[in-house]
Image (cartoon, rainbow, N blue to C red):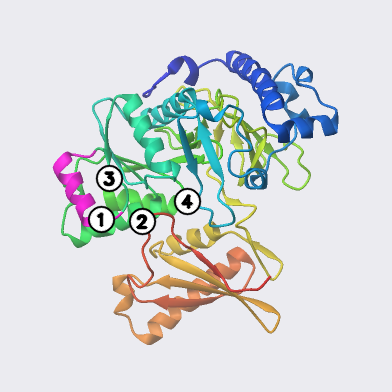
């Protein structure tokens, strides 16, 4: 074995031991759901399923799925499996795509979540000696406090900077000696741009790693962040309904994210049929929260599209790995009958040397869908002639068409003209009334 571990007895456990842990936790969780969550009791009764029918993790496919709308329909606390008196914290999603979803935690849930985040920090090389610079938002969003408690559980020093006031963030990095940066990848790029603008050599900072999540990003964007900040950039995965950050993360091998599957049992299913897909095939990621008390969701449909990697990782961890999600079933754009993921477009732009500052504008004109890709020029391009810019625009458009099998209009914008985000970047503007 090699690498840093926080709980090696679990992170490096044999598959047989993990299966036993998963089975025992699932049996207890199913009973809790049936006895304490009216929606689950109703669904069990509708299909004639009793808690006693679940005898091991192999029986998980007998259980009904849970959907995001279930949390909205039972808003705010209808899915909780414990009395309100046992809750020590609640978080909520932003509600940008509908009524916000509310999640709750018992004291044990907070400990489980913190342990999982501590594992993630350790897998990226984090130690008790590190200063963790947390630029995720604090509040109802799970990012800031999730990383914060994980840093403290690891024994490291948490710097709760939150988002905003980016120049001050850079000064804090200089003065406090921040070692690991945690934020969204788009904000990491913005911090890097700010460091450049301030005339600071990133190598003069003590940063050596970054743990980025909460929005999709490509391998090309990873390379840009690593070059801009002179660090290694690691992916972390989570969603508020399951726990928040810490469900899965990359180790120092940077070859897929290890899922904390003794707490969150993962499946990959065909999103249309609900059937499991063979290992190695892409499908929708589903989680069962076998380690939680307050909100123990059964087979929650994440809508993230990914696949599992089951080959032995060089880091020594035995937890299954998931690839970086290649898109979502709900942010997949259907344009003139073609499935398009924003991440595909981002990958093309970055491969052509452009910064990951772009927006996609979709409209419907005369009953025909149109796609306009607005992308910022870099400083070198901005000084080019009009003829040169037209040539670049045509080249981008042709490359996008060969990748997406759909024509698009490319509009080059001045540097820094697309609004920067301190949280999740707004990539898509869909003007269609569909």
Indicate the position of residue 86 as horizontal and vertical percent values: 51, 25
Of helix, strand and loop, which one carries label 4? loop
Of the numbered discs 2 and 4, the one sitting upstream in the chain is 4
User: Which residue carries the number 3 mark?
Assistant: 161
Asked whether the viewer can see residue 172, the reply is: yes
Q: Are marks 1 and 2 in contact (CB under 8 Å)?
A: yes
Q: Which residue lies at the image location 38% right of the left edge and 63% below the top edge?
A: 355
Mark 1 or 3: the one toward you:
3
Q: Which mark is residue 166?
A: 1
Per the image, is 28 magenta? no
Quick one: 42 or 199, which is closer to the camera?
42
Of the numbered discs 1 and 3, the one sitting upstream in the chain is 3
Quick one: 244 or 351, which is closer to the camera?
244
Give the left or right position of residue 331, taking residue 426 as reference. Answer: right
Indicate the position of residue 383 as horizontal and vertical percent values: 29, 79
Q: Quadrant of residue 213?
A: top left
Marks 2 and 4, how far apart at CA:
12 Å
Of the numbered discs 4 and 1, the one sitting upstream in the chain is 1
User: Which residue carries the number 2 mark?
Assistant: 422
Marks 4 and 1, how far apart at CA:
19 Å
Q: Which mark is residue 215?
A: 4
Of the numbered discs 1 and 2, the one sitting upstream in the chain is 1
């Amino acid at each position: 074995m090699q690498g840093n571990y926080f709980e090696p007895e679990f992170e490096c456990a044999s598959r047989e031991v993990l299966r036993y842990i998963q089975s025992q936790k699932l049996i207890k969780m199913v009973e809790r759901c049936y006895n304490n969550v009216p929606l689950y009791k109703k669904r069990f009764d509708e299909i004639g399923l009793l808690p006693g029918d679940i005898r091991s993790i192999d029986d998980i496919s007998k259980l009904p799925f849970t959907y995001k709308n279930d949390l909205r329909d039972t808003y705010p606390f209808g899915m909780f499996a414990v009395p309100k008196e046992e809750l020590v914290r609640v978080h909520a999603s932003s509600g940008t795509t509908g009524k916000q979803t509310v999640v709750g935690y018992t004291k044990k849930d907070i400990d489980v979540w913190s342990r999982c985040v501590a594992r993630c920090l350790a897998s990226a090389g984090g130690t008790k000696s590190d200063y963790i610079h947390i630029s995720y938002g604090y509040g109802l969003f799970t990012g800031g406090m999730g990383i914060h408690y994980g840093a403290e559980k690891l024994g490291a020093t948490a710097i709760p900077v939150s988002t905003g006031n980016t120049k001050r963030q850079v000064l804090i990095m200089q003065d406090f000696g921040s070692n690991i940066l945690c934020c969204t990848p788009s904000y990491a790029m913005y911090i890097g741009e700010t460091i450049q603008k301030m005339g600071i050599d990133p190598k003069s900072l003590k940063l050596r790693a970054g743990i980025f999540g909460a929005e999709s990003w490509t391998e090309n964007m990873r390379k840009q962040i690593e070059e801009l900040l002179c660090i290694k950039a690691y992916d972390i995965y989570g969603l508020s309904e399951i726990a928040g950050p810490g469900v899965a993360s990359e180790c120092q091998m940077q070859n897929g994210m290890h899922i904390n599957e003794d707490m969150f049992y993962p499946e990959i299913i065909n999103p249309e049929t609900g059937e499991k897909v063979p290992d190695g095939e892409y499908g929708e990621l589903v989680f069962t929260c076998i380690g939680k008390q307050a909100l123990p969701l059964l087979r929650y449909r994440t809508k993230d599209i990914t696949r599992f990697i089951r080959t032995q990782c060089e880091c020594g961890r035995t937890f299954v790995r998931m690839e970086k999600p290649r898109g979502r079933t709900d942010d997949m754009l259907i344009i003139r009958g073609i499935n398009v993921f924003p991440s595909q477009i981002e990958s093309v732009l970055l491969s052509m040397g452009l910064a990951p500052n772009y927006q996609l504008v979709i409209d419907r004109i005369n009953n025909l869908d149109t796609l306009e890709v607005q992308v910022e020029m870099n400083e070198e391009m901005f000084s080019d002639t009009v003829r040169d810019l037209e040539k670049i625009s045509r080249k981008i458009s042709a490359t996008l068409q060969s990748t997406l099998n759909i024509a698009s209009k490319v509009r080059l914008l001045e540097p820094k003209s697309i609004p920067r985000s301190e949280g999740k970047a707004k990539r898509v503007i869909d003007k269609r009334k569909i």
